[in-house]
Image (cartoon, rainbow, N blue to C red):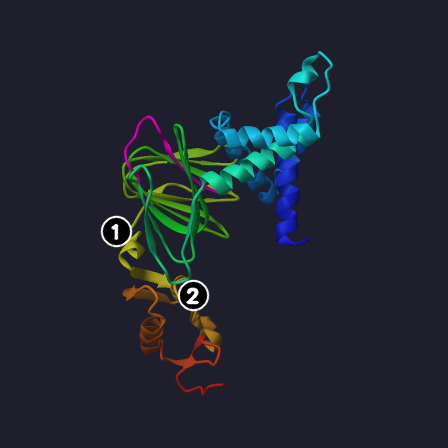
Amino acid sequence: MSDQAELSRAETEAAEWFERLRRPSVTARALKDFQAWKQSSVNAEAFRRVEAGWRATGALVGHPEVQAAAREVLAKRPLRRRRDWRQIWLPAAVAGALGLILLAWADRALAPGYRTAVGEQRLVVLDDGSRVRLNTDSTVRVVFWGDMRRVYLRRGQAFFDVAHDPARPFLVDAGGTEVRALGTRFDVRRDRDGVSVTLVDGRVRIEDDRGEAAELLPNQQLRVTDAGLSRVRAAGADAVSWTNGRLVFRDTPLAAAVAEVNRYSAHKIELGDAAGLGDEPVSGVFDAGDVEAFASAVAAVYGLRPVDERDGRIVLVPAAQSSGG
């Protein structure tokens, strides 16, 4: 099954589960089946999207375009006229279709999107005065409606400088992780293995999709993975140095430093035959995107030679080794 087909299947099932769980007759067996279904990260994120969509559209019920979308769905599948409690609830298929239509409508019409290419950074000023700085290869969607301020970090990394508004909490949704703030400055990074949150000023509350939560104070950070929330730890002074265009390494394993440098360039560095040096420490300050300077510095320290390949890669090889082309 393709990724797109799996996502479509998950969103349809999520909408059906959402409606089913709202019924007064939901059984313990159904709850157990739901928990098993939600073990899939794709399913869990789809369910969170449906929940968020219904929360958003709850404030939109008076909007003429939303009402038109609802009428269109209901016209195709009218409710039966029996006068019992079932009359209150839409059939699961209708509710699922309506939920997905409203969610898609809100995502398209109300949620402007911003993205950056590899190596690009971008500063976005939101309608409330909050500022979002996107790091390399990142995508966000912004939903401001009524008393809701929500930013969806689809991928990558963003630094948030939130305008203070106690009446409207500011939420960042990064898949299975939600970060809640009022007026504060913090960094959220989403990658394949989880989500990292670093707080610079103010206070944030972080919650994962299992309900585990923690609060951060200034200069603290934590990471959220499938295993749950990590312990809160101190953040280094250079934890958000990327916002100034710099990458700072302090005894960072070489393999990890190479992976970080590669985020900012289409021309990737590879350790090649030097892979055995992957755990060796690297320290230094580099301009984000300057892979040549990083490769040259590492080569000088560890007796390597950077080889420019035809496809744009820079392969680090032992200095005595000739290029394989």
Number of the label disc, if any, that sits on residue 255: 2
- At horizontal 61% and vertical 23% (from top left) the residue drawn is 22
What are the residue bounds of the magenta stretch?
Answer: 160-174
Is residue 17 at all visible to an observer of this figure?
A: no
Q: Is residue 203 above or below residue 244?
A: above
Examine the rendered structure and indicate whether residue 181 appears above or below residue 88: below
Percent of width and height locating residue 91:
69, 26
In the image, what residue type sits under mark 2? Ala
Residue 261 colored in magenta in the image: no
Does 79 appear above or below 229? above
**Residue 67 located left or right of residue 292:** right
SS class, disc 1: loop
Comparing 128 with 290, the one in front is 128
- Amino acid type indicated by mark 1: Ala
Q: Closer to the N terminus: mark 1 or mark 2?
A: 1
Residue 114 position (above or below residue 88): below
Using the image as rendered, state which of residue 277 and residue 219 is in the foreground: 219
Question: Residue at the location (68% across, 19% down)?
Answer: 25
Disc on res. 237: 1
